[in-house]
Image (spheres, grey):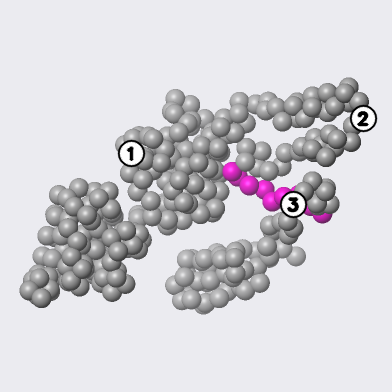
């Protein structure tokens, strides 16, 4: 009997379920309940070191959205088979069969082969996890099948699909980083991202500014206490709806800047702005809003006197 995939926590009815494939556990992120601790691993259970071990497989490799044929394609022969052939005529026939076997027939397959290679390159540049890469490949494949790529550059659609996958998996990456990795202007990536998500009806939650704190703090070499204080500031700002309608990177960088001043780890607005990919004006404006609305002026002034 196939077990149905759980959609909510049996303890608190939360839908914030996390499946850790490395540990084989299904965990509720809200209450911490371990729902399942013996997940079935559908990945391959062997290692290959030569052609002989490949021929002794008991099953095929797992499917992957990052391959144009989803990993279901076949291959005619292997290198070891070539040396077993005795005549030149048989060898010529062997290479001819291999050539026709790997030849791609449809326009969609040709597009996917080139685009998914570009997707892997950008994903590697941004150091994205495999789950994000698979999700981005699935989104791009749907966009190609619906004809959304027509009239747009392949690179912009790839970048838009990757950005959408990052947002869905809560992996903080900015449009500036996407633009730097793909060589496409961030305005074009944002425009393509909104078009693809709208046409494919992909629902994406707003970015959480707190997700950017660890990356920015690591780049600025700030302590754990400063990180915790910046997250606390963001939670206070969220409670009074100060984060609504503002860019997540800007408000996160400003909170980190305020926390660094409070804990005596002073960083300039230019340093924080360069790490966050925003302007000094943005940092300055968000900083003024935070200390005024959250009444942090005394804490900041007190730290300056030390």
Q: Quadrant of the N terminus?
A: bottom right
Residue 116 left/right relative to 219: right
Q: Residues within 10 Å of mark 2 (few under 14, many from 20)?
A: few
The C terminus - image quarter = bottom left
Q: Quadrant of residue 272?
A: bottom left
Which region shows up in magenta?
A: 58-66
Q: Position of residue 156 (x, y in %)?
A: 42, 34
Q: Residue at x 14, y 55 (%)?
A: 284
Within 10 Å of disc 1 (Cα), the crowding (few <14, some 14-19, many 20+) is many
Asked if the residue at tag 1 contacts the one at tag 2, i.e. Cβ–Cβ closer than 8 Å, the answer is no
Q: Main secondary structure of the magenta part?
A: loop
Q: From the viewer's perspective, is 233 left or right of 303? A: right
Q: Label 3 belongs to which residue?
A: 49
Image depth: mark 2 or mark 1 in front? 2
Q: Residue at x 22, y 52 (%)?
A: 273
Question: How far is the residue under mark 2 from the one under mark 1?
Answer: 57 Å
- Work out whether residue 61 can be spotted: yes
Dot 1: what SS?
Answer: helix
Drawn side of residue 137 relative to residue 166, left or right: right
Q: Nearer the viewer, residue 92 or 186?
A: 92
Q: Which residue is mark 2?
A: 86
Q: Position of residue 37 (x, y in %)?
A: 62, 74
Give the mark nearer the N terminus: 2 vs 3: 3
Label 1: which residue? 186
SS label for mark 2: loop
Circles 2 and 3 in contact, beta carbons < 8 Å:
no
Q: Which label sits in the foreground, 1 or 3?
A: 3
Whether the residues at callouts 1 and 3 have beta carbons within 8 Å, the answer is: no
**Residue 266: x and y, percent?**
18, 65
Mark found first going from the N terminus, 1 or 3: 3
């Amino acid at each position: 009997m196939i077990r149905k995939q759980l959609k909510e926590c049996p303890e608190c009815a939360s839908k914030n379920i996390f499946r850790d494939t490395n540990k084989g556990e299904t965990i509720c992120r809200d209450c911490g309940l371990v729902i399942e601790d013996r997940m079935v691993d559908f990945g391959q259970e062997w290692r290959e070191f030569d052609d002989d071990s490949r021929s002794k497989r008991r099953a095929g490799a797992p499917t992957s959205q990052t391959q144009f044929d989803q990993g279901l394609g076949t291959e005619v022969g292997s290198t070891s088979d070539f040396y077993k052939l005795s005549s030149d005529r048989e060898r010529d026939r062997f290479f001819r069969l291999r050539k026709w076997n790997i030849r791609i027939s449809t326009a969609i397959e040709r597009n996917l082969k080139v685009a998914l290679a570009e997707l892997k390159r950008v994903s590697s540049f941004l150091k994205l996890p495999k789950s994000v890469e698979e999700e981005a490949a699935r989104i791009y494949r749907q966009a190609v099948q619906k004809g959304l790529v027509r009239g747009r550059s392949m690179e912009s659609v790839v970048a838009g699909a990757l950005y959408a996958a990052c947002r869905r998996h809560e992996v903080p990456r900015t449009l500036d980083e996407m633009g730097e990795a793909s060589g496409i202007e961030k305005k074009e990536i944002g425009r393509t991202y909104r078009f693809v998500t709208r046409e494919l009806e992909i629902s994406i939650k707003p970015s959480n500014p707190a997700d950017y704190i660890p990356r920015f703090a690591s780049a600025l070499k700030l302590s754990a206490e400063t990180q915790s204080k910046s997250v606390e500031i963001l939670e206070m700002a969220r409670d009074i709806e100060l984060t609504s309608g503002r860019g997540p990177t800007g408000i996160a960088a400003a909170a980190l800047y305020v926390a660094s001043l409070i804990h005596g780890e002073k960083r300039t607005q230019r340093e924080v702005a360069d790490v966050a990919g925003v302007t000094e004006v943005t940092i300055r404006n968000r900083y003024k809003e935070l200390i005024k609305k959250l009444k942090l002026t005394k804490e900041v002034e007190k730290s300056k006197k030390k």
